[in-house]
Image (cartoon, rainbow, N blue to C red):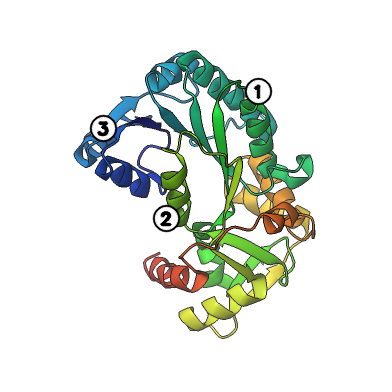
């Protein structure tokens, strides 16, 4: 089977590409860098070098594929809102799939895609899902992942300097988290299934409150006074901007963080809860310690 994958040699594709090649599929990987071509080919896949923001290129990369995996990647336009960025990319995805005649798509989406602008940055995935649903006679599965464990690595500087994790969300709020390997498992199962009836598939590895995260990391890092500090939305926004995050992205992240305090945020996820993935937060904590010590 001919498969085309976006995402280059990223966190998820490091698992999916070797698995698909080993299974005997003819795999093409879209990458924006010539520097990754040799590494992609060494795995046994083909490289298509270009930008997913280029409809003509993406159409060419998808043409002839029996199935394609789509995902957002790359930087954001500092001058555009996240919704504007998502709308542009969604149209490119839709048009390229339609022009290429691909009939099976797996799209990496996100928890919150069932909701509106109140979920902030995650509303991008709602826009993309809605636009892809305009395609006729295309079998689409939306893999809605929750927050990556690796997102917590961004807190290493303040843990070192202040023994604190700063977030504009309550410490008792539950965080649904996942690992790229567990997301890859879902994609590996879904993409070659041309007759899949799965519309939405959530991927979750573990649930942890902020307090539980603090307890685990405090023990692993041997920092007894590690604490969770709840910021106001404005304080969170200011902190992200100081870190160099583009304002539209910082605003979206601030909104989505606060939205997690709402009992409605995970309502659809809990109503369609999948079997939890294999990688637990305690497993990730070992990697967190390593990253902390080497930072």
Q: Residue at x 24, y 39 (%)?
A: 39
* Residue hosting label 1: 134
Is the residue marked by circle 1 packed among few (<14), some (14-19), or many (20+) residues within 10 Å?
Answer: few
Q: Nearer the viewer, residue 174 or 245?
A: 174
Tally of numbered discs: 3
Judged left or right of residue 142, residue 33 is left
User: Mark 1 or mark 2, which is nearer the start of the sequence?
Assistant: 1
Look at the numbered disc 2 and give the secondary structure of its residue: helix
Q: CB of mark 3 within 8 Å of CB of mark 2?
A: no
Alpha-carbon distance for marks 1 and 3?
A: 33 Å
Place of residue 69 in the rendered image (x, y in percent of width and height, measured from the top left): 46, 35
Q: For residue 233, which numbered disc appears in the image?
A: none
Kindly indicate whether the residue at mark 3 contacts the one at mark 1 (C-beta within 8 angstroms): no
Tell whether 154 sits left or right of 65.
Answer: right
Residue plotted at (34% across, 48% down): 14
Q: Quadrant of the C terminus?
A: bottom left
Residue position for label 3? 37
Residue 80 location (% of width, % of height): 66, 28
Q: Earlier in the sequence, mark 3 or mark 2?
A: 3
Toward which corner of the image does residue 244 lie, by quadrant? Answer: top right
Q: CA distance from mark 3 to mark 2?
A: 22 Å
Question: Could you tell whether 249 is left or right of 19 in the image?
Answer: right
Does dot 1 land on a helix, a strand or a loop?
Answer: loop
Rendering quarter of residue 43 = top left
- Write down the residue under mark 2: 181
Element type at mark 3: helix
**Measured along the vertical axis of the image, is residue 266 above or below residue 130?**
below
Quadrant of the image containing the N terminus: top left
């Amino acid at each position: 089977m001919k498969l085309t994958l976006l995402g280059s040699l990223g966190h998820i594709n490091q698992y999916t590409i070797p698995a698909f090649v080993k299974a005997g599929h003819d795999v093409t990987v879209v990458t924006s860098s010539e520097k990754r071509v040799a590494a992609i080919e060494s795995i046994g896949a083909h490289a298509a070098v270009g930008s997913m923001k280029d409809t003509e290129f993406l159409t060419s990369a998808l043409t002839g594929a029996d199935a394609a995996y789509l995902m957002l990647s790359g930087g954001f336009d500092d001058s555009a809102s996240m919704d504007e960025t998502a709308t542009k990319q969604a149209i490119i995805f839709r048009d390229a799939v339609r022009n290429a005649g691909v009939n099976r798509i797996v799209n990496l989406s996100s928890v919150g895609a069932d909701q509106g602008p109140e979920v902030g940055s995650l509303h991008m995935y709602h826009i993309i899902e809605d636009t892809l649903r305009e395609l006729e006679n295309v079998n689409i599965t939306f893999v809605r992942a929750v927050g990556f464990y690796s997102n917590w690595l961004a807190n290493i500087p303040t843990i070192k300097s202040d023994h604190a994790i700063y977030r504009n969300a309550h410490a008792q709020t539950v965080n649904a988290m996942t690992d790229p390997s567990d997301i890859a498992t879902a994609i590996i199962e879904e993409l070659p299934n041309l007759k899949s009836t799965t519309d939405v598939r959530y991927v979750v590895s573990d649930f942890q409150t902020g307090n539980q995260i603090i307890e685990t990391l405090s023990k692993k890092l041997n920092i007894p006074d590690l604490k969770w500090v709840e910021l106001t939305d404005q304080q969170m926004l200011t902190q992200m901007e100081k870190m160099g995050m583009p304002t539209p992205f910082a605003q979206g992240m601030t909104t989505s963080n606060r939205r997690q305090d709402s009992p409605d945020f995970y309502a659809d996820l809990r109503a369609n809860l999948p079997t939890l993935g294999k990688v637990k937060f305690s497993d990730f904590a070992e990697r967190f310690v390593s990253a902390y010590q080497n930072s």
